[in-house]
Image (cartoon, helix red, strand yellow):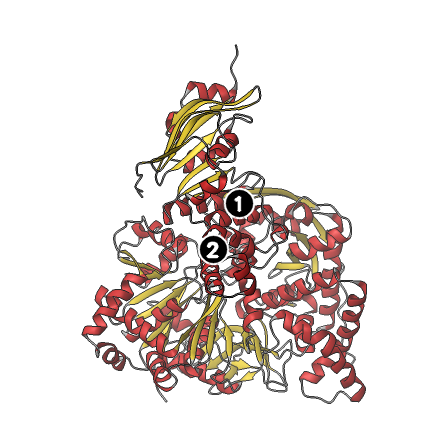
Amino acid sequence: MSKKIGDVILDVKNISLRFGGVKALTDISFNVKEHEIRAIIGPNGAGKSSMLNCINGVYTPSEGSITFRGKTFSHMNSRQVAEMGVARTFQNLALFKGMSVIDNIMTGRNLKIRSNLFMQALRIGPAEKEEIRHREHVEHIIDFLEIQAFRKTPVGQLPYGLQKRVDLGRALAMEPQVLLLDEPMAGMNVEEKQDMCRFVLDVNDEFGTTIVLIEHDMGVVMDISDRVVVLDYGKKIGDGTPEEVRSNEDVISAYLGTSH
Amino acid sequence: MLTTFPRLLLKHATERATAPAMREKEYGIWQTHTWADMAALVEQVACGLHQAGLRRGEHMIIVGANRPRLYATMLAAQSLGAIPVPLYQDAVAAECVFPINNAEVRFALVEDQEQVDKMLEIRDRCPQLSNIFFDDPRGLRNYMEEGLAGLDELIGAGAAFSKEHPDFFKGEIDKVQAADVAAMFFTSGTTGNPKGVVHTHGTLIDRAQAGAEFDKLTGDEEVLAYLPPAWIGQNIFSYAQWLVCGYVVNCPESAATVTIDLKEIGPTYYFAPPRVFEGLLTSVMIRMEDAGALKRKMFHAFMDVAKRVGPARMDGKSIGFGNALMYWLGNLLVYGPLRNNLGMSRVRVAYTAGEAIGPDLFSFYRSIGINLKQLYGSTETAVFVCLQPDHEARADTVGVPCRGVEIKVADNGEILVKSPGLLREYYKNPEATAEVLTADGWYHTSDAGFLDAHGHLKIIDRVKDVGRIKGGANDGAMFAPKYVENKLKFFPQIKEVVAYGDQREKVCVMINIDFDAVGNWAERQNLPYAGYTDLAQKPEVYQLIKECVEKVNADLSIDALLAGSQVSRFLVLHKELDADDGELTRTNKVRRGFIAEKYLPLVDALYGGKTEQYIETVVKFEDGRTGSVSATLKISDAKTFAPVKAAA
């Protein structure tokens, strides 16, 4: 099994992020290559989610720049990032609990829908045809994630592992080039984790989507990622293949602690 | 009329080209394949397989769930005079080795990545397996193994070939005769290697027709195909009878959506083993317990009416005006909505077979107006031997012989069958064939039973399992293990039972509780438990099971023949018996001998009079890993009753 890893698609340069006096990120640089699975790991409070939020446009970094597909920017809003083809899932599942699985995933198509609210409400013009097209896309995702049995179930009634899958489905609905996953396996049992791993690998494999993921489960990270960045107290302490990172002294001490 | 499956396909494709043949739910919508679509697809697959080198008389395995393209491939193989061999899709890789090597299989069509992985895993043990095709390419993009190709590519190549040779397909079909082998089914067998049951086009089509005539099936039936196609029952219902009658077979979206799909399709002809009916009933009952007080009251009141008059009504007897009125009201308020909820509003004929069905379960479905019936048959007889006529369905018999069938009871109580649907042979196993198929044309079913006064067949047990109690109070009494096991299994709290008693002085049983039913019961009793093993060993659960055992004993004591089979001691097992651990066959029958060996300390403890016993068991998980469970099991005594002698 071999997959083709392309050129650098996302380049993060000297990013620093400060909240008042607190330095969340200090001078972080790393890159992500096309079609690869890139993991960001680190102890609690290391700045992993902040890093993702910078890429995602939720936070504006105090210093540094992000280059996506050759375009460099120092700050932009999350809508612009989404329009450029970057989607994400959330650590705490920001799903619409009262809406069905289909409707939740359909919201991921929002940016792709061209007809306006008025046309959609009255089903006039191209609105209906467009909806059918988008629904078809959503059905492919449902099939892909094997959640056919829950199509019409309100998301709030689903077990946590399935909600995570719906969250992934909504991100996939954007047809992203880069997918940011914020702890996709947190709170899952072994079987659910295995399923999720398979889906992440399948997304990467089938659609060629580049994946950046934050994860705590070391087994998962070492198994599925191509390269790993390690953060600790907002600083980058390691970067490389899982094997390289595993044998990195700084990483070992960050995780296991050292005597000073 | 003598015909073959490919010819039947062409007949439908010419006579009713635009009528639906199969539907498959995909992307949330039922996609229809007409008979013309089906014939075109089969032609392309057949041409592709021919080009890939599939030869006349050669076996090809098909592994997967019910998918139109898998059924089309069976037809394509048959069109070329090759023999499709469906294998169980949930079998572990090692179980596929024997059939593949036994039938010298070079070609395989499998459903998806899971099955491809299995085939690749055993490839070094099956060196002749050269061509593996897959239906669903998902996850297989980067598989570079030699001989692995998508069905899409095969169809593409076949389409090009058939354009160049437009007469090839029909020419090949003309060469296939009714007496040619049509398919081979491997029977799981409780001991030894599986045996390949060889059936011809003639045998399968004859039985499919006999069954269709018996229930007056038409081309308008709707069937939901959801059981493994490797099981002859599913194969008859969604393949042989599909082609004979020309009805519509619907393939569910996935195993998880079957109940949803069932409601959407509303089949008119339905088939399920007893455990499916039991599962449905359990889920209804559990949901009913959670309903509001008024609904619950109404449900129980009308179910009492149904219980009282429903079965008689289904048998076509008069139930009187008052009862008819109550039943009509009940139908409006309870039975109708319930049938709808079960997806059985349109069911005209429903069958159950494979195991004995509990009398309460059986009459529940009949009482709410579902025409549930039993049939008797096996892989070797191409299913249809005995069927119950519409107004003569009983829980303890399996019906009257259908067209073409002769039945005889041998001196040892074994049922012998003569029918045009008997197997030709066991593949490459003349000894086994000679054992069951005697020169005078009788097939030995190895079931013990008799024809009752109304000409209905009644099955007691397997001939070889019927034993004798030796020593003790009931010395020499008849012991029918399955009869005892089934009586216990009819309780919803009990999922599986293994009974011992042959050549021993008393009967002892090991019991598996039904986790759903007992778990639910425990929650209602405010009984905390930490999982299956913990729940199984609760004293309260033992008391519950003990009551069931004693009820069965009371029941058995009335039966002059089987009073000696009453259960003296029992225990509740700490793990569920599982086919993956070899304890059940793939069709979920208990392997009594294997279990006795595996749990020898437990059997010894049962007969040795101990009150508890420690046991450690290795379990195999679905992905092939192993682990172990251990527990100290309690052993309990049960009250037995003095046999009630019929008043002389």
Residue B479, position as x, y percentages in the image: 63, 66
Q: Is mark 2 on a helix, strand or loop?
A: loop
Per the image, the residue denoted by label 1 is: A192
Near mark 1 (Cα within 10 A), the count class, few <14, some 14-19 or many ≥20, is some
Task: Have a look at marks 1 and 2 and say if they share a chain.
Answer: yes
| Residue nearer the viewer, B526 or A102 | A102
Residue B553 falls left or right of residue A223: right
Q: Of the residues tagged 1 and 2, which is closer to the observer?
A: 2
Q: Residue A113 carries which label?
A: 2
Residue type of the residue flagged with mark 2: Ile
Residue type of the residue flagged with mark 1: Glu
Image vertical order of residue A217 relative to residue A138, above or below: above
Where does the N terminus of chain A fall, quadrant-wise?
Answer: top left
At 68% from the left and 62% from the top, the residue drawn is B492
At 72% from the left and 60% from the top, the residue drawn is B549
Do we see residue A76 in this rendering? yes
- Could you tell me which chain the residue with mark 1 belongs to? A
